[in-house]
Image (cartoon, helix red, strand yellow):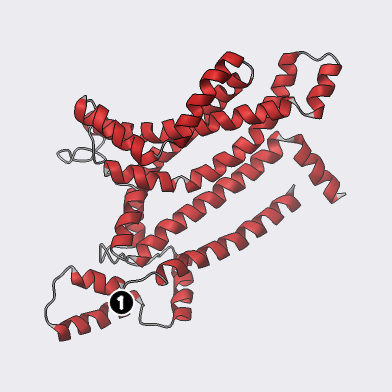
Amino acid sequence: MWRYMGRKLFVYALTFIVAVTINWMIPRFMPGDPVRSMLNRGSISDPEALERMTAYYNEVFGLDAPLHEQYLSFWAGLLRGDLGISVMLYPEPVVDVILRAVPFTLALLVPAIVLSWIVGNRFGAFAARSKFLDNSILPVGYVLTATPYMWLALLMVWSLGIVAGVFPTAGGYSLALTPGANWEFVSSLITHWFLPFLSMFVVALGGWAIGMRNMIIYELEADYATYLHALGAPRRLVRRYAFRNAMLPQITGLAVQLGTIITGALLTEIVFNYPGLGTLVLDSLDNRDFFLLQGIFLFVVVGVLIANFVIDIVYVLIDPRTRVQMTGGSS
């Protein structure tokens, strides 16, 4: 077990170094100058003053140094927990900007992903053992999977926000309220959270249901299922084994979704003007904020790696074949 974990840690550490390096490179090879973008918002008319301020801020952000020095400085700051200063919100540190947005994104993504995974897998399992449910759930699942996040979000804003007036259509909470531990503020958070959550939950639900339905049907046609049927095993027992085996790729998909669904959050948060990481990505792109952009990508990279590492551990615990292979490899 320890040898297995050591190999996994080495692979994840190497992956982290490569991913962070690519994360550092992408913003710097984007077109545009972040300092010029920041100064242009100030409408400075004197060309000489503009040049002096450009040189000053390039030095402040370390953009006047050679690329290899910028790369080493980035790693040095990362090891200290310093991701630099936001160009868009100067002089606020990137870490502070991200920490303000992370709770909103996590409160939106984690319930949407986990609940859609649980409910979708249950519906898929029911569809695999009932022809009636299969004929009704499968088409609905395909429709939900093909539904774009943005289109469904716009539909919910129009129907439930504007026409029905049941939920607010924008923001993370009412700007008339002061954040605090009181029911009025908490209820405002929940009402502003519900529509973004619902749009992501509904779209993800169909994919999980289709995936589980297909995997269970595949497992029921495998050799071990045929062998158990030949031995006279109850259908319920065979389906239980099929369900457990079908869960393995679904668990892997859950780990990937926990990190990569930031793309869906980007569209959803833009529609609802929700103050999470997705909205920050768009704002940082518009303002050429290299440091904020690479900080957000770093958060996504770390999230994906941690989720996959946890899933690797869960695999060992729930799949006996993994433990047998580990024992055989170490003998």
Q: Residue at x 16, y 86 (%)?
A: 48
Residue 274 visible to the viewer: no
Of all residues shown, which one is farthest toward the left? Answer: 45
**What is the crowding at mark 1: few (fewer than 14 residues within 10 Å), some, or many (at least 20)?**
few
Of all residues shown, which one is farthest toward the bottom? Answer: 48
Question: Image quadrant of residue 90?
Answer: bottom left
Measuring from the top left, give residue 1's x and y in whole percent. 75, 47
In the rendered structure, the answer to whether residue 271 lies left or right of residue 117 reads left
Q: Residue at x 59, y 19 (%)?
A: 126
Question: Image quadrant of residue 219?
Answer: top right
SS assignment at label 1: helix
Q: Residue at x 42, y 30 (%)?
A: 202
Q: Residue at x 11, y 78 (%)?
A: 45
Measuring from the top left, give residue 177's x and y in whole percent. 17, 38
In the rendered structure, the answer to whether residue 25 lies left or right of residue 48 reads right
Residue situated in front as seen by the camera: 273 or 77: 273
Residue located beneath label 1 in the image = 60
Residue situated in front as seen by the camera: 307 or 117: 117
Measuring from the top left, give residue 329's x and y in whole percent. 83, 49
Measuring from the top left, give residue 145's x and y in whole percent. 48, 34
- Up the image or down, 182 lies above or below 32; here it is above
Residue situated in front as seen by the camera: 191 or 228: 228
Q: The residue under label 1 is which amino acid type?
A: Val
